[in-house]
């Protein structure tokens, strides 16, 4: 092959490859244009513009009286388009930029006017379309900022870009903070009402069209959302802010005093199961406590002596004992262990007295003796009362109760039963124990506590809640009556006598002291105790049930001494502030007895005084004075004819001056007391402005 042929062959080969490559490119272009055109066009559009979700304002959480516990307030992020229509002309921008900088400096106070001017001028030189001006601006501040130079040119001309965000605030700050909870997308487990009812509270997100600009920054295309978000529903909780404040302060004060590790207190309405207040505090530093964990619903521990009400209920219901049955106290030996009373022996006493003085040895002996041959009979009561089940609360985080039975592998036939009798070998939360006490106060009706009464949207009810009935009747009326009397005895004759008793109203309850195991180290690693007191009030007509639990107090550890003062303080303040618990004063009807002394004057004031005194008024007489009748006090306000002098004889000075002044007359006064004489007789016609002398005696 000669050289020419060789060259031509190479040229043809190269040309052929170019043609093939050209056809391949052409084919690919056609494929992209026609086969995948829509896909790539959509992708291109998404890189320049896109819709983003705008979070809706979360619904409010209200207290039972309508007070705001949690709400969302708008918070704004401000940006500026340096090439907006109104300032596109350099002369307009540079003429007003210094005025804007001065206003911003005066308002924000973090930079000088010169610094703000340089920032704005540099942004203008760089043709920035989304220059950050300020974060976290309130609505009130935004209204003022809109009036600044340049920004006051209008929504689009001035270049002010407003991005709204919603900030969650608690108006009462730490009040019921753990119960209110929070909702965070980065937190897996929901907390409190915010987490439990997030689907209602969050509302529906809106859509906003955003455009990608230089630097990969996304800015809104329009000032308003394309699809407006829908605000979330409101939650009406059962919390009473006044009671919540009382409970938190009382608990916190005692935790600091006793240098305890943590504590919880819960106040619940007996008939409805509505939780009026719940407080949880954990020690974070010496003398400093915060709500870090919800011990009320998740703090599973041995309840101690507060559990004795369940033991005695079982004994009384099965007629194993009566309140007058005699029993020894002090110590009770079981294989491998001796059960002791913390205060020593009080001798042989009645079951009622043993309960009032919280004898561990007595209840352990009674339960072990009565159920030793059929131990499941005792635990069957506990299971029938559903103490082994969760309450099914409206907020997440409830711990699973642990109540053993003879079928459990950890059951010891010699030790478990007598130790369960006084509150060991089990795990129950404070709210679980309170619910059982509440059942005794509620005539045997065992109900699950609730934290939410209603869900509302735009003021209209969406869903309403009532307490779920767990057990209609936990025991017979006879047993219930005996148990109630024994619990009242704790306050009048037993461990609560010198601490809880209040002569003004009756309280029923039970103290509890339990040694707490130290993690995996057991009970002997370090003596750590839990002090508690649970009960209800007023005992004769229960309105509220209450439990106080204080864990690891350093200055004393007995339930009555440590938790009792908190119970007493809360009960006293709740009782004094809840007028519904006080019986209405009886009406006193005035017949032919001596009538309360009054003076002629303001009828409304007189009627108000009678109402406070409980005196029945009668509005049927035409007499200008009061009259003593068998039906009550008849009265009618004194009226005067216009243009005549009023008769003020018998009135107090303040009323007389008020009447004379309204009639247009000037008065001079002599003496003290009530008006005995007036210089111009009532009914006389004299010119307004004339002087009238009043003589008081």
Image: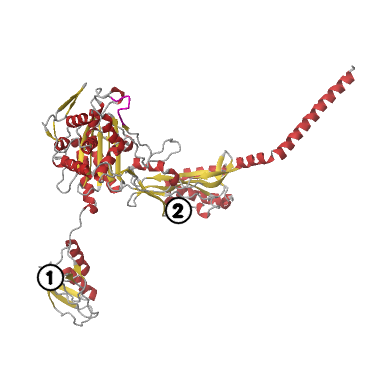
Q: Give the range drawn in magenta.
A: 403-411
Residue 641 x %, y %: 23, 79
Is 525 on the left-hand or right-hand side of 35?
A: left
Answer left or right for 17 relative to 123: right
- Residue labelled with disc 2: 143
Q: Could you tell me which residue is drawn at 84 percent across and 24 percent down?
A: 11
Q: In which quarter of the image is residue 298?
A: top left
- What secondary structure is marked by label 2? helix
User: What predominant SS class does the magenta segment belong to?
Assistant: loop
In this view, the mark in front (1 or 2): 1
Q: Is residue 242 magenta?
A: no
Contact check, label 1 and label 2, Cβ < 8 Å: no
Image coordinates for residue 431, horizontal then vertical, percent: 30, 39
Label 1 environment density (alpha carbons within 10 Å; few <14, some 14–19, many ≥20):
many
Query: For mark 1, what is the residue?
Result: 674
| Mark positioned earlier in the residue sequence (1 or 2) | 2
The answer to whether 518 is drawn above or below residue 214 in the figure is above
User: Residue 233 location, x and y as percent?
Assistant: 43, 49
Q: Check disc 1 and report its element: helix, strand or loop.
A: loop
Locate the C terminus and report the quarter of the image it occupies. Answer: bottom left
Q: Residue 352 appears in which quarter of the rendering?
A: top left
Q: Label 2: how many residues lie within 10 Å, few (<14), some (14-19) or many (20+)?
A: few
Residue 209, image x, y percentages = 56, 46
- In the depicted view, which residue is nearer to us: 442 or 647? 442
In three-dimensional space, the C-alpha distance between marks 1 and 2, rounded to whole angstroms, equals 59 Å
């Amino acid at each position: 092959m000669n050289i020419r042929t060789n060259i031509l062959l190479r040229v043809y080969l190269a040309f052929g490859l170019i043609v093939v490559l050209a056809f391949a490119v052409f084919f690919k272009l056609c494929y992209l244009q026609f086969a995948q055109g829509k896909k790539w066009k959509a992708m291109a559009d998404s890189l320049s513009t896109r819709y983003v979700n705008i979070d809706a304002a979360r619904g409010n959480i209200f207290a039972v009286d309508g007070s705001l516990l949690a709400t969302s307030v708008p918070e704004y992020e401000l940006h500026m388009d340096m090439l907006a229509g109104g300032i596109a002309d350099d002369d307009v921008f540079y003429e007003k930029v210094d005025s804007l900088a001065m206003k911003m400096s005066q308002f924000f106070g973090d930079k000088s006017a010169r610094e703000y001017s340089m920032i704005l001028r540099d942004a203008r030189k760089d043709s920035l379309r989304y220059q950050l001006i300020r974060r976290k601006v309130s609505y009130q501040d935004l209204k003022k900022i809109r009036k600044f130079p340049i920004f006051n040119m209008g929504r689009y001309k001035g270049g002010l870009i407003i991005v709204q965000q919603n900030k969650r605030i608690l108006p009462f700050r730490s009040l019921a903070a753990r119960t209110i909870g929070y909702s965070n997308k980065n937190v897996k487990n929901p907390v409190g009402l915010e987490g439990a009812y997030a689907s209602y509270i969050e509302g529906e997100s809106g859509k906003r069209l955003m455009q990608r600009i230089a630097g990969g920054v996304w800015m809104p295309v329009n000032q308003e959302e394309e699809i407006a978000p829908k605000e979330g529903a409101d939650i009406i909780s059962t919390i009473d802010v006044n009671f919540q404040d009382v409970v938190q302060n009382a608990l916190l004060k005692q935790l600091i005093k006793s240098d305890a590790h943590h504590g919880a207190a819960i106040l619940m309405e007996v008939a409805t199961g509505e939780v009026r207040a719940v407080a949880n505090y954990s020690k974070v530093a010496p003398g400093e406590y915060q709500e870090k964990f919800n011990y009320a619903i998740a703090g599973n521990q041995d309840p101690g002596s507060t559990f004795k009400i369940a033991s005695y209920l079982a004994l009384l219901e099965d007629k194993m004992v009566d309140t007058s049955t005699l029993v020894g106290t002090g110590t009770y030996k079981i294989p491998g262990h001796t059960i002791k009373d913390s205060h020593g022996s009080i001798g042989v006493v009645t079951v009622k007295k043993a309960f009032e003085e919280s004898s561990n040895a007595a209840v352990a002996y009674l339960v072990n003796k009565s159920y030793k041959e059929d131990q499941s009979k005792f635990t069957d009561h506990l299971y029938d009362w559903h103490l082994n089940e969760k309450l099914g609360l409206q907020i997440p985080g409830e711990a699973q109760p642990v109540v053993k039975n003879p079928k459990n592998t950890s059951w010891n036939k010699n030790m478990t039963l007598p130790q369960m009798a006084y509150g060991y070998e089990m795990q129950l939360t404070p709210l679980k124990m309170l619910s059982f006490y509440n059942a005794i106060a509620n005539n045997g009706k065992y109900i699950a506590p609730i934290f939410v009464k209603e869900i509302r949207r735009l003021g209209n009810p969406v869903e309403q809640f009532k307490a779920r009935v767990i057990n209609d009747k936990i025991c017979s009326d006879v047993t219930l009556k005996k148990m109630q009397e024994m619990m009242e005895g704790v306050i009048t004759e037993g461990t609560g006598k010198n601490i809880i008793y209040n002569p003004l109203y009756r309280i029923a309850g039970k103290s509890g002291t339990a040694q707490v195991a130290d993690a995996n180290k057991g009970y002997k690693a370090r003596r750590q105790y839990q002090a508690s007191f649970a009960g209800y009030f007023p005992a004769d007509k229960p309105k509220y049930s209450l439990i106080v639990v204080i864990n690891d107090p350093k200055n004393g550890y007995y339930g009555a001494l440590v938790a009792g003062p908190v119970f007493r303080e809360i009960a006293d303040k709740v009782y004094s502030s809840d007028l519904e618990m006080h019986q209405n004063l009886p009406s006193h009807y005035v017949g032919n007895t001596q009538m309360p002394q009054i003076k002629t004057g303001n009828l409304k004031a007189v009627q108000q005084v009678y109402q406070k005194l409980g005196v029945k008024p009668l509005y049927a007489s035409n007499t200008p004075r009061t009259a003593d009748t068998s039906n009550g006090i008849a009265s009618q306000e004194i009226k005067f004819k216009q243009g005549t002098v009023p008769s003020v004889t018998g009135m107090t000075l303040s009323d007389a001056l008020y009447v004379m002044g309204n009639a247009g007359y000037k008065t001079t006064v002599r003496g003290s007391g009530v008006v005995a004489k007036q210089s111009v007789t009532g009914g006389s016609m004299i010119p307004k402005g004339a002087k009238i002398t009043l003589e008081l005696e």
